[in-house]
Amino acid sequence: MSDYRIVNPATGESEAPHPQASAEDIESALASATDAFHAWRRTSIAERQDLLRRLAYLHEERAPELAAVMAREMGKPVRSGRGEIGLCAEIFRYYADHAEEFLADEVLPQQDGSTALLRTAPLGPLLGIMPWNYPYYQVARFAAPNLLLGNVILLKHAPQCPESALRMAAMFADAGLLSGGYTNLFVDNDQAARIIADPRVQGVSLTGSERAGASVAEVAGRHVKKVVLELGGSDPFIVLDTDDLEGLVAEAIVGRMGNCGQACNAAKRFVVLAEVYDAFVERFAEGVAAIRVGDPLDEGTTMGPLSSFAARDEVAAQVDDALAKGAVAMAGGGIVPGPGAYFQPTVLTGVGPGMRAWGEEIFGPVAVVHKVADTAEAIRVANDSPYGLSASVHTTDPDRALELVDLLDAGMVYINESPSTAADLPFGGVKRSGYGRELGRLGILEFANRKLIKLRK
């Protein structure tokens, strides 16, 4: 059983659970989604654009209350929460604004004089399995392109985000989406597997852990269903040189500590050339130690608690393991005493093979800094990870950075900025970070039937 309830990570207070869906509820949702798909695929592009624009407006209108919900559910500071909601609005508007371009038929030149077209058509009902770290953004980047395409959505949210899940569903309804076009389901993993297996469901998108992704891919594979997986990362932030140490450190702090370090594409490993290393570590540790940790409902708070006590304890175990084996905490290094799932913003040096912090993703406010002798060693360390989501290279010479891009095992590479996300940029990784792309033009093609039409007159 999955216990869909809020346990406030800032206080430990637990709210009443929400009832889990029954078999009858799931069957009703599947039947409704199937009916909705047959109707929604026949709507005009203009109708779908209007829906997405109304959704953008509703996100902006309700941003303060949605941000307060996230603070209670997973500890996100309210000002960060409002930023997330603003990004959702941008995503819905982006797909509305590019609808005709993305859905236009592609003409394929034919030597025999016939006409050939490639049409981007929908597949049917899709299941989204979403995490807690960005409760609205994760849904928006899945739902916006697929609703524009003509697909319909069944959504399993993280058990600790039931109120965000319900408020998201309410916005789709309030925007005027037909019944069955977007359905929230409070289901456990076994129920989700049965939904994936159901022949009415045509694909599944999951953002979550490697373990969850492997499980979903296994079920989907047995039933020949399309899958998109985004499974996290241990992204390298490579420093070659700098003529602006303060700016570089500020970028590094934002890149690692945003959302309490709980972002898949956060800069988690800092790979720094020896000639810059000492100065970088000193200023980086000072900046990290100065981060204001506090009540996520306080407008002045920069960093709230981790999403749960279990998450905090896992980060503590990874850090304790590194410290016990010889790593050094240049800042932080432990649990914040008192109520709440707080952990000190931390900088670790001296991390090596055999420590959990070397090979595992640390999903919390912990930065691992490695000293390397040259660019060849920087690439070796950067690629010494099972993950390959994103990477960044920082230097005064962009041409030098461009020479390294093709050597990095990553789905996204940023030069002189931290990894980020935007409505118009494709998002996704390689290796154990998953496969498939979301956002941008590529985001509308993952669950599309690229239908060939050939006409001889």
Image (cartoon, rainbow, N blue to C red):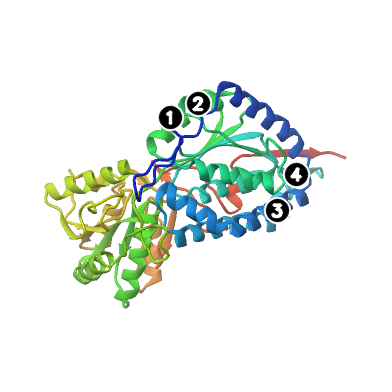
Determine whether the residue tagged by mark 2 lies in a helix, strand or loop.
helix
Q: Nearer the viewer, residue 23 or 283?
A: 23
- Amino acid tagged 1: Ser
Residue 425 visible from this viewpoint: no
Identify which residue is drawn at 29% across, 46% down. Answer: 312
Q: Which residue is mark 3?
A: 99
Residue 446's spot in the image, x, y percent?
Answer: 58, 42
Label 2 vs label 4: CA separation? Answer: 36 Å
The numbered dot on residue 113 is none
User: Which mark, by number, is residue 193?
Assistant: 2
Residue type, mark 2 in image: Ala
Mark 1 / mark 2, whichever is N-terminal: 2
Left or right, residue 142 beside residue 319: right
The N terminus lies in quadrant = top left
For the residues labelled 1 and 2, say whether their Cβ atoms are less than 8 Å apart. yes
Give the secondary structure at mark 1: helix
Q: Quadrant of residue 143?
A: top right
- Which is more foreground, mark 1 or mark 2? 2
The answer for how far apart the CA atoms under marks 1 and 4 are is 37 Å
